[in-house]
Amino acid sequence: MVHDLLILLSCQLAGEASVFFLELPVPGPVIGFLLLFSICLVRGRIPAGLETTAPVLLSHLSLLFVPAGVGVILHLSRIVEEWPAILAALLLSTWLAVAVTGLVLARLLPNAASAPR
């Protein structure tokens, strides 16, 4: 499991370093995940250890929200000041996600509306 965690953390570190040095406007873990995905694609399979390590990490995923919650509380005064913009962004992004999902579904399933139920 230590070896597999080393692989995951190395990909995240490489992503963070890429973002820092290349000044990319994307979070480092996203770049790290893309790197890990690319490695799995090149190998043609997911390493066996990652198949067992990943579910263990995912089962404790809620613990990763604790630092984010602390950050929200830390910046609560800023959230109070900027709540209209935050609310607008949340509503707009939700609406866009629903609209795009509907359009993609309509495109992928063109006969779904006329199919018998």
Image: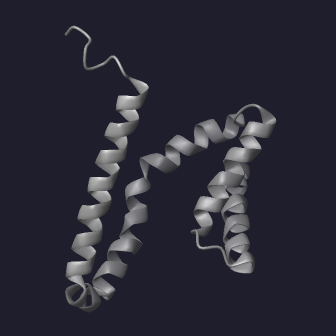
In-front residue for pair 115/59: 115
Question: Which residue occupies 20% across, 87% down?
Answer: 80
Is residue 2 visible in this depiction of the protein? no
Could you say which quadrant of the image residue 101 lies in?
top left
Vertical side of 20 occupied by 32: above or below: above
Q: Nearer the viewer, residue 30 or 74?
A: 30
How far across and down, in percent of the image, does residue 38 sit? 73, 46
Classify residue 41 by image quadrant. top right
Left or right: residue 89 compared with residue 33: left
**Relative vertical location of residue 33 with respect to residue 92 in this rendering, above or below:** above
Q: Residue at x 24, y 91 (%)?
A: 77
Q: Is residue 3 visible?
A: yes
| Image colouring | one colour
Q: What residue sits 43% from the left and 52% below the top?
A: 60
State which quarter of the image contains the C terminus: top left
Residue 16 picture quarter: bottom right
100 or 47, which lies in front?
A: 100
Query: Residue most toward the top?
Result: 116
Counting the numbered discs, the total is: 0
User: Where's residue 31, x and y in %?
Assistant: 65, 61
Q: What is the x, y in percent for residue 66?
A: 37, 69
- Measured as percent of width and height from the top left, residue 102 is found at 31, 38
Residue at 47% over, 48% down: 58
